[in-house]
Structure formats: C-alpha cells, structure tokens
Image: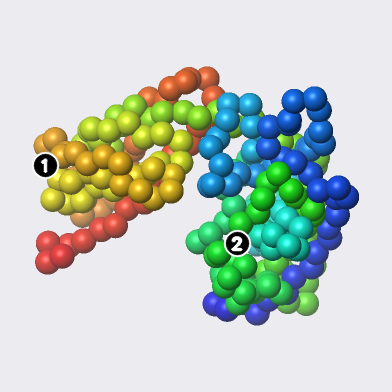
Amino acid sequence: VPGPPPAWTRVGKIFNPPLNLRRPAAGGGNQSDWAAISREVQLETDDRLGLGFWVAGDGRGAVLNLQLLSPRHITGFADHYVVLDFTGWRYVELVEPESARLEDYGWPYSGNLYRLYRSQVDFQQVECLNLWLNNIPAAGAVAVRIGPIHALPLTPVILRKPELRIGQTSVKIPVDIGTGEYVELDDAGGCRRYDAQGVLVETAGLPGRPLAWEPGAERIELAPQFQPGGASVRARLTLFCADDDG
C-alpha cells in the first residue's frame, strides 16, 4: 500500500434489524440519522442520502473514515474520508462513497479487490456503521471529537450550460449537466456528456478556441447556474494539461 505504514483503530455500531436509509416506505419503518448514496438507484427528491456532522480535528493529518456496511450476504461497504489536517471544529458534508482514495491507506480489508470495487452497499439494508482512524502518527496520539451524524436530503439539480474560464480565455459548455452526470472536453473542440452510469448520451462542439494556460499563475473559474436554486450545490472540475508537443 503506498504511503506511510498503516496504523488504524475502529469503533462501530451494529443495527438489528438493518436500517433502511432510502425514502421510508409508506406506513413507517426504521428511521436513521445518517445515510449514503448508491449509483444504482435513481435519486428521489425526498431521499436523505447525505452525511452532515461537526468534527473537531487536531491538525495532525489522521484520516477519519465513516464506513457503512450491508449484511454479510451482500458484502458491500462504503467508505467516506475526512482528513483531519485542521484544528478546531468544522462542519462536514459527505455524499458519494470513496473510490479514488480507497488504496491510499492501509486498512485490514485492503487488497480485497472484489469487495472494494465490485460489491456495493444496499442502502436499504445497512447493518453497521464503523468509525475508523488511519494515518495515526507513529508514537503519537490523535484527538478527534465528532458531533451527531445527521441525514441530509439531497435534491437533483441541473447545471445549465456553465462557462469555464482560465485566465483571460473562456469557453461556454453547450450542454446541461444533471446530478451524477459528467462532461468531457478535449482540445479539438469536442464535448461529450455521460450519465451517472457512464453511458454516452450527448455530443456537441465547443464554440470558440480551446482554453489556453499562459505561463505563471492563472485563475480557474466555473460559472454555473443551478436549477432548482436555493440548495447547497457543488461541482467537481478535473484538468489535464499538455504542452504544444502533446
């Protein structure tokens, strides 16, 4: 495992019967103070699929992992990382389970590729919540305090034809982007929109010339217009840079 030697600890709670973290069925059912999201289920307006809580860090860089597990016959789990590189209290909101950083830290379940990347949590059957700490300093201690973990309702939104600016150049992205979708832009002027399952659903051409990154520091901005408005919204931007030789 890349990075420092693993040093971890864990506390957890088992729920019997398992919790249903999606929209409660008509007539009642188990309620929960925390939740997570699955790619396989369509997001409903009233689903409480976000994690929101206050956490106090000590600035030593330990990693807090909120992990949800389904029963053993389902085998899936969902990690959610918070790097405690800050001091004092901070409010944290989490949505998607981890994927890119799953192997950045050494966990007892590291190396189990089938369970890490193949199995998924059934969020209608969550049997356990684990709180892990990793990247604990050698011969040291970690001080962390966590407030109540609450479920947050998620609302599907649409990002209306945003504008991407780098320095003095900008480009208008000619497609709308829905919750869970993503768009790829290339230096040949191509634009491709994919749905939440990674299926190509739309192609378009970019107006104007490609974005250029001039030598030195440049300001990068994404000017979005979200609908519906009024919600706490976010978008992720990933850049790949190439020189004139490709």
Residue 224 in sight: no
Task: Pick the residue in front: 166 or 217.
Answer: 166
Residue at 56% over, 42% down: 41
Residue 45 pos. (x, y %): 58, 26
Q: Secondary structure at mark 1?
A: loop
Displayed quadrant of residue 48 = top right
**Which residue does the numbered mark 2 point to in the structure image?**
119
Whether residue 57 sits left or right of residue 99 in the image: it is right
What type is the residue that disc 1 sits on? Answer: Arg
Residue 156, placed above or below residue 35 = above
Residue at 21% over, 51% down: 186
Residue 135 pos. (x, y %): 67, 69
Residue at 39% over, 43% down: 195
**Which residue does the numbered mark 1 point to in the structure image?**
209
Residue 66, placed above or below residue 21 = below
Could you tell me which quadrant the N terminus lies in? bottom right
What type is the residue that disc 2 sits on? Answer: Ser
Residue 36 pos. (x, y %): 65, 44
Could you tell me which quadrant the C terminus lies in? bottom left
